[in-house]
Image (cartoon, rainbow, N blue to C red):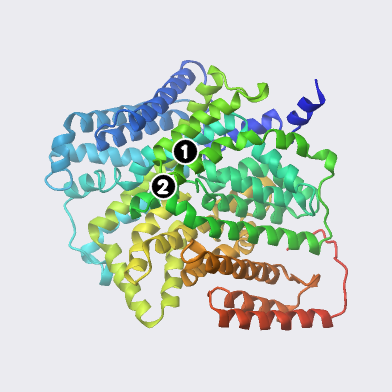
Amino acid sequence: MSKDLKETEQTVVNDDKAKELEEAVEGALHHRELTGWIKYTFITIAVVGALFHLYVLNFHPIEPWVFRSIHLALGAVLGFILFKSWKTSKKVNVVDWLLIAATLYVTFYIYTNVSALLFRFGVMPQTQDTIVAVLGLIIVLELTRRTSGWTLPILAGVFILYAFAGPWLPGILNHNGYSFGRFVTYIFGTDGVFGVTLDVSSKYILLFIIFGAFLQMSGVGKYFIDFSFSLAGGMRGGPAKVSVISSGLMGMMNGTSAGNAVATGSLTIPLMRRVGYSGRFAAATEATASAGGQIMIPIMGAGAFIMAEVTGIPYSEIIIAATIPALLYFLSVYFMVDFQALKNGMKGLSRKELPSLRGILKQAYLFIPIVLLIGALLSGFSVIRSGTVAIIACLVVSWIHPSTRMGLKKIIHAFELGMKNTIQLLAVCACAGIIVGVIALTGVGLRFSSMLLGIADNNMFLALLFAMGISILLGMGMPTTAAYAVAASVVAPGLIQIGIEPIFAHMFVFYYAVMSAITPPVALAAYAAAGVAGTDPFKTGVTAFKLGIAAFIVPFMFIYSPQLLMEGSAGSIAVACITAAVGIYLLSAAVQGWFAKKSANIIVRVLLIGASLCLINANWMMDLIALSIIVVAVLIQRMRAPEDPVITQKIS
């Protein structure tokens, strides 16, 4: 083998690890091991389903409700085959077949009666309509329970209960109530389950998850990690910085922060521990970076597609607006792990343990699908056309090198993997539609908006704090997509009503929905990473919250400094970026207790927090106050006795 080929193939990701990355699904632990004819049936349905979606989206649109019902049916059939009903359920059983039969019946009923149902559902339903709607809701709730656990179905159940209990509730929660038939058909109609969330799932989420599967099969996922190691592995505390970069790149594709934390964390967490980080800190770093993957452009997990659909703002404008906040978030996490490495005198991995930089650069062509996707979106092509072209680009790019070439077997596996990875998010979107439907039917969202407006009349900052708390609370225990969909229905309209621009309101809510994955007491991404590291889940969640603290500040930054969402002149945007970056640096220094080459005492940390808060607002007077505080903090640090970095085994 030639030297050049050896350099190109040098990697930190072996074949087993590459397979783990391919299978990065949050519910993977609940998968059945499919064998025999069941396995081949699953593969056939998955591949045909993926091709069906691509054909309809690009060449032959069909009635939206029919398309969404087939989308849900494909996900449900595959889900009931793949996901265990209980931990001990290793084979497809009678209950699974009954649920699959019910799914096919419900889908056939919608297909054959769609014209009449558009007028009857939610208004004057017939008995058969009610039966179909009840069956459909049971299917959605059970599929969500299997793929994502109990949290979201229980929350949906609470909202369903509210719809019937409303007449007896006080204050803003009171409503007139609804008949059983009208309620269930409304919720299982185009304003509920088959509403905007499942619309986005059928058109955009599935498309980009298939794109992510093609990226994996063409070697790009593996390349992302090798690229991250080559770039940052040799720096102080290198594996933690690798985690930040690789999890951001991987997380934007797979749409699930917890699944990404398990997939990339199984590689990065042991390496972080090897260079001196504690297990808890390593797991928290991976969780924080994986959560950040959901805000990483250009794909931003899946929530950005819902944002585009709900607000009517072009997707290209959303990713442009999201660029600076995403970079600030990852800059903050980078500072956090760097300060920790400084405090503990850490070093990086040796050069011989890392992929060859020359070999990595030779494979830079693997970035072409991502570059092409961004270019197509910014050039005004539709999201569907841009995503389809990017999928084809993955296939073409894979043929450049023998080790990544996609043949028929890999193409079939990519389609299967894409559909498999869609099941959980599809279920989540359908279940979130139940909650969104109840909010729309009862009008509780509008009442919440009025309450928020009342708070804002007294203090805008208090209204934003209240909105932040509700967004995090609604998102706890839920995947990002569902968390944002629910928060966007409840909180975003209120923020818009108090005078905040729609893109600012929705981006504000989106950030806190994402951060619910690392917010105790229910921090899904942190709990997943803690499982890999073997650390206490709650304590890992607290550490992840500390590392991601900047994400709780960044939304306030862009509300008070619109330049951070690309609003204003180039000069004002540049100044806002610089001051925001300085603020992020100071906040990280305060949290980690390290400033001006030595540990910081409580007084210095308070000063640094004060300075960082002053830099939230793009105002020269506040910037001057922040500068004065920084000078005082530096003087205090210089007057203190010099100290050497202390190497400790336990890192708080």
| Residue that label 2 marks | 305
Q: Amino acid at mark 1?
A: Phe
In the displayed structure, would residue 396 be above or below residue 128?
A: above
Find numbered disc 1 in the image and state the secondary structure of the residue it sits on. Answer: helix
**Lateral position of residue 2 relative to residue 421, left or right:** right
Tell which circle, 2 or 1, labels the residue nearer the N-terminal end.
1
Residue 200: % across, % down:
37, 43
Between the residue at mark 2 and the residue at mark 1, the CA separation in whole angstroms equals 10 Å
Residue at the image point whose x is 38% and y is 55% from the top: 486
Say whether marks 2 and 1 touch (CB < 8 Å). Answer: yes
Find numbered disc 2 in the image and state the secondary structure of the residue it sits on. Answer: helix
Q: Amino acid at mark 2?
A: Phe
| Quarter of the image that includes the C terminus | bottom right
| Quarter of the image that includes the N terminus | top right
Looking at the picture, tell me which residue is in the foreground, 448 or 228.
228
Task: Name the residue furthest top.
Answer: 37
| Mark 2: few/some/many CA within 10 Å (<14, 14-19, 20+) | many
Residue at the image point whose x is 47% and y is 38% from the top: 208
Residue 170: % across, % down:
26, 71
